[in-house]
Image: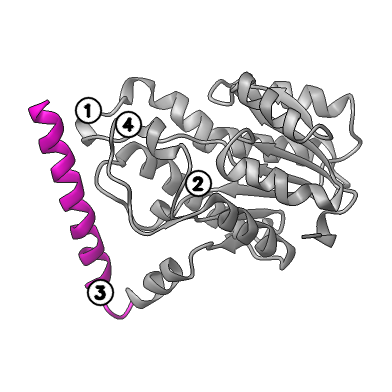
Amino acid sequence: MLYKDFQETNIIITGASSGIGKELVRLLLPSKPQILAVDFDAAGLGKLQVEFPEIHILEADLSSKSGNEKILNWISTRWNRVDFCFANAGKAEFGPAENQNWKEADQLFQLNVHSPIQIGLALRELFPKAIFRLVITASAMSFWTIPGYSLYAASKSALLQWARTVWAEKSGDWLILVFPIATKTKFFETAGKDIPKAWPMQSPSWVATSILRGVAKGRKRIFPSPLFLSMLVANRFLRFIRPLYQLLEQRKYKKWLKKHSES
């Protein structure tokens, strides 16, 4: 599909070697933009460039404060503007709140929260005359938490509150947040061992398509799942919906705890 809004644009995509990021690359290429695909996985980036040789690739670890510097250095010597930055890189951890890796929480928050905010602000400063859009992959857990994801939910909620403040200041036309539900990517594999998968689930292709359509329509908040958005609205009037959903997820969580306590 050809997306006219992305024709002849310069685009950064982080977390680009798999999942939603890879689908964004695939869907955008027919519009012939210049794409810089960023990931910490060098092997994954290599495979991505073999599949899509017209893209640029850059290995960068965005859980480190120096990660964004690599992107900015690359951009400043090659492009005269950035039109879109899809800040999609992120990770999760799963387990009881007291057992999650709080000692290294700063790295997760750097990746999930600080990095997308910092790169957006830096690009606006670098190219002040450009019409720029920062599209951050947040999560449905920004609104509804699920047992086992205390650290991840905290980071995604932080993103939402920051964005709400920017929008409230009437200075955030450049900022877009995306709230996917569970997606069939490596998310669950990297979050923990044999962790329960939240319901419902969507494909990364569907999520990426929803993102591009939402950006093209000028939306500030993008919900790839109409079902989740409907549940979010309905829960304002039928307050049992969220507790019921969380009860179902809590049962999965307890089964996971029991299984791992016996192993």
| Mark 2, residue position | 159
Left or right: where 173 falls relative to 5: left
Mark 3 or 4, nearer chain start:
4
Type of amino acid at the residue the image marks with label 3: Arg
User: Residue at position x 80%, y 60% from top?
Assistant: 3
Type of amino acid at the residue the image marks with label 4: Gly
| Mark 4, residue position | 192
- Nearer to me, 173 or 184: 184
Q: How far apart are marks 4 and 1 (CA)?
A: 12 Å
Q: Which image quarter holds the C terminus?
A: top left
Residue 108: x percent and y percent? 45, 29
Q: Distance between the residues labelled 1 and 3?
A: 31 Å
Q: What label sits on residue 239 in the rendered view?
A: 3
Disc 4 residue crowd, few under 14, some 14–19, many 20+, Cα 10 Å: few
Residue 204: x percent and y percent? 55, 50
| Mark 1, residue position | 99
Q: Is residue 110 above or below residue 130?
A: above
Q: Is residue 150 magenta?
A: no
User: Residue at position x 89%, y 24% from top?
Assistant: 77
Mark 4 or 1, nearer chain start:
1
Q: Give the range drawn in magenta.
A: 236-263
Mark 1, mark 2: which one is toward the viewer? 1
Mark 2 or 3, nearer chain start:
2
Q: How far apart are marks 3 and 4 (CA)?
A: 31 Å
Residue 249: quadrant of the picture:
bottom left
User: Residue at position x 42%, y 66% from top?
Assistant: 228
Q: In this view, does 261 lie above or below 166?
A: above
